Amino acid sequence: FRPLTLERRAARLAAAADMWDLRNIARRRTPKSAFDYADGGAGAELTVRRTREAFDSTELLPRILHSTAAADLTTTIAGGSSALPFGIAPTGFTRFMHAEGEDAGAAAAAAAGIPFCLSTMGTRSLEEIARCGDTATVRNPHGPGRRWFQLYLWKDRERSADLVRRAEANGFDTLLVTVDTPVAGQRFRDVRNGMTIPPQLTLRTVLDASYRPEWWFNFLTTDPLHFASLSNTSTDLSTLINSMFDPTLSLQDLEWLRSIWPGKLLVKGVLTAEDTRRSLEAGADGLVVSNHGGRQLDRAPVSLKALAEVRQEAGPNVEVLLDSGVMSGADIVSALALGADFVLIGRAYLYGLMAGGQQGVARAIALLEEETRVAMMLLGTATIAELQTSGQVRVPWLP
Ligand code: FNR
């Protein structure tokens, strides 16, 4: 086993022209059960497929002779600024995908000047991520890295309250409450792969290790102890998640969180006008239109299609974010032009991570930044605000 040098890693990443290339590199370098856990969706993966089809069906309408010398990608979201109109979505078990895990995400996000959201199921603590962001900030031209925290409500409310208090104490400025996971989605790829946390030593994992020595070396030298602390025996993810989260999450819980969290509160997983209204009535500051990347309820609506309904109910002054399926700058531009204020990336970040740790996440962010910039220049829009109001997108599902 010969560790790859950072230079070789950089050359490999530079050869990725787009996110799909990065995904291919990720697939080659990551054990199948870890790649499929990140890449897969729920059920027959219909929502995942329909999401891709919806993004691919948008038409962007360029304005010619509308001189735009440069595109300004900076924006504001949840009471702070962001150098780019997207941030990193919360993902669980991230160090299972690559040993650098959340450290890589938080550092790359801070360096790019965009928010990083830590998950309740993250494999780093709030305190560790707080420190990690600070270190990255030392060289950061964009100022302090913004950290958000995503909360799943535990059956034990005191444990949730403790997380919320620690998020506040560690400088996390925004809380995302995920409401679409009363139980774990059924992800059949994980079942077929026999995926467990921590991974079990089987003939399959030993064979896999011989193809991906770097991943296994990193995993064996950094992670097993942490994963073992999550459960005494190897457990499949659904069993693990269902034993921890509270399926009875209600509006009263949201009101309770509002009363104990002083920062911005976003409800993640809203897809309808009714849930928009209820979330706002319970005190949410904003909404994340999300179907959890098609990983929870298969056949749930495509976020991009649900966006107009949520935006209409929320009105122009409530911040509406979107995630699920964003793989390119054209996807980001489409979402913003259809009424989103900001976009979150889940898998795109993880593909970068699996392809090359922190450098890979930086590459994923750079790809999306450049694609967004070029798309805006070609559209003739100079700012994010202009993009949101200039009506330069046409979609088959809206008149
Ligand atoms: C997620 N997502 C997620 N969401 C959340 O609120 N808490 C979590 O712990 C996780 N964990 C998680 C793990 C993995 C591997 C993925 C891919 C996703 C959902 C995530 O925040 C986001 O909603 C989706 O990833 C967005 O879709 P794309 O960008 O992955 O297509």
Image (cartoon, rainbow, N blue to C red):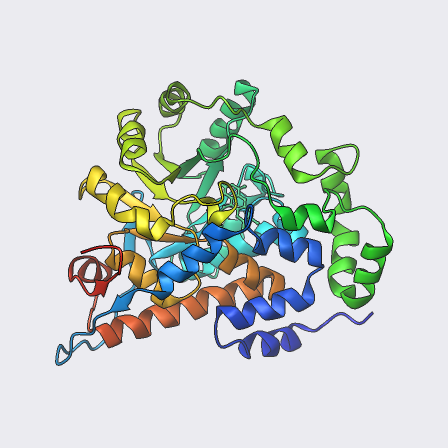
Res 178 quadrant in image: top left
Looking at the rendering, in which quadrant would you find the C terminus?
bottom left
Looking at the rendering, in which quadrant would you find the N terminus?
bottom right
Horizontal side of residue 98 vs 44, given as left or right = right
Measured as percent of width and height from the top left, residue 258 is found at 36, 25
The residue lying toward the viewer, choosing from 311 and 298, is 298
Measured as percent of width and height from the top left, residue 169 is found at 47, 32
The residue lying toward the viewer, choosing from 19 and 272, is 272
Q: Residue at x 46, y 35 (%)?
A: 180
Q: Count all numbered tags in the image, as a single digit.
A: 0
The residue lying toward the viewer, choosing from 248 and 361, is 248
Q: Residue at x 30, y 61 (%)?
A: 334
Horizontal side of residue 187 vs 62, given as left or right = right
Measured as percent of width and height from the top left, residue 62 is found at 20, 74
Horizontal side of residue 359 vs 191, given as left or right = left
Whether 73 is drawn above or below 267: the answer is: below
Seen as rendered, the residue at the extreme right is 203
Can the viewer see residue 145 in this picture? yes
Seen as rendered, the residue at the extreme left is 65
Res 51 quadrant in image: bottom left
Q: Residue at x 29, y 43 (%)?
A: 79
